[in-house]
Image (spheres, rainbow, N blue to C red):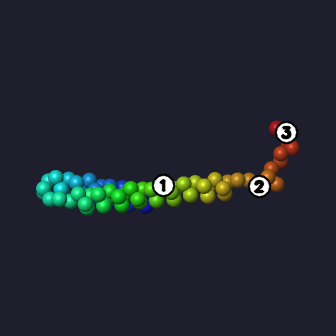
C-alpha cells in the first residue's frame, strides 16, 4: 500500500507538470490523486502500526516460564 501511495504521488506530480506544460485545468484531478495518495499513506502507516503491535505481542514471554527468583 505504501508503494502504491508513492506511485500516486508521482502521478500527482506528473499531472501538475502536465497542467503547467499544456495549459489545461487539471487541478481537480491533481487534488484527487493527492487525496488518494495521502489516504493510502495513512492506511499503510496504520497497518504498519498494527503489524508492530502483533510482532511485539508475539515476543512476550509468559511469566510462568520466567525464573524470577534466579540470581545472575
Q: Give me the C-alpha separation between circle 3 and circle 1.
A: 42 Å
| Near-viewer residue (11 or 61) | 11
| Near-viewer residue (57 or 25) | 25
Of badges 1 and 2, the one in the foreground is 1
**Residue lying farthest to the top in this orientation:** 72
Q: Give me the C-alpha separation between circle 1 and circle 2.
A: 29 Å
Helix, strand or loop status at disc 2: loop
Helix, strand or loop status at disc 3: loop
Q: Is residue 48 left or right of residue 34?
A: right
On the rendered image, what quadrant is the C terminus found in? top right
Looking at the image, is mark 1 or mark 2 earlier in the sequence?
Answer: 1
Helix, strand or loop status at disc 1: helix
- Can residue 7 be seen here? no
In the image, residue 52 lies at what x, y percent?
58, 54
Q: Which residue is mark 3?
A: 71
The disc label shown at residue 62, or none: 2
Q: Give me the C-alpha separation between circle 2 and circle 3.
A: 19 Å
In the image, residue 61 lies at what x, y percent?
74, 53
Residue at point 60% right, 55% down?
A: 53
Residue at point 25% right, 61% down?
A: 29
Q: Which residue is mark 1?
A: 45
Q: Are marks 2 and 3 in contact (CB under 8 Å)?
A: no
In the image, residue 3 lies at what x, y percent?
40, 58
Q: Residues within 10 Å of mark 2 (few under 14, many from 20)?
A: few
Of badges 3 and 1, the one in the foreground is 1
Residue at point 20% right, 53% down?
A: 17
- Can residue 66 be seen here? yes
In the image, residue 12 lies at what x, y percent?
28, 56
Q: Are marks 3 and 1 in contact (CB under 8 Å)?
A: no
Residue 57, by quadrant, is bottom right
How many numbered marks are there?
3
Amino acid at each position: 500500500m505504501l508503494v502504491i501511495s508513492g506511485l500516486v504521488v508521482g502521478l500527482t506530480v506528473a499531472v501538475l507538470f502536465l497542467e503547467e506544460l499544456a495549459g489545461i485545468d487539471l487541478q481537480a484531478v491533481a487534488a484527487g490523486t493527492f487525496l488518494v495518495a495521502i489516504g493510502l499513506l495513512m492506511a499503510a502507516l496504520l497497518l504498519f502500526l498494527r503489524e508492530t503491535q502483533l510482532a511485539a505481542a508475539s515476543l512476550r514471554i509468559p511469566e510462568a516460564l520466567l525464573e524470577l527468583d534466579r540470581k545472575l
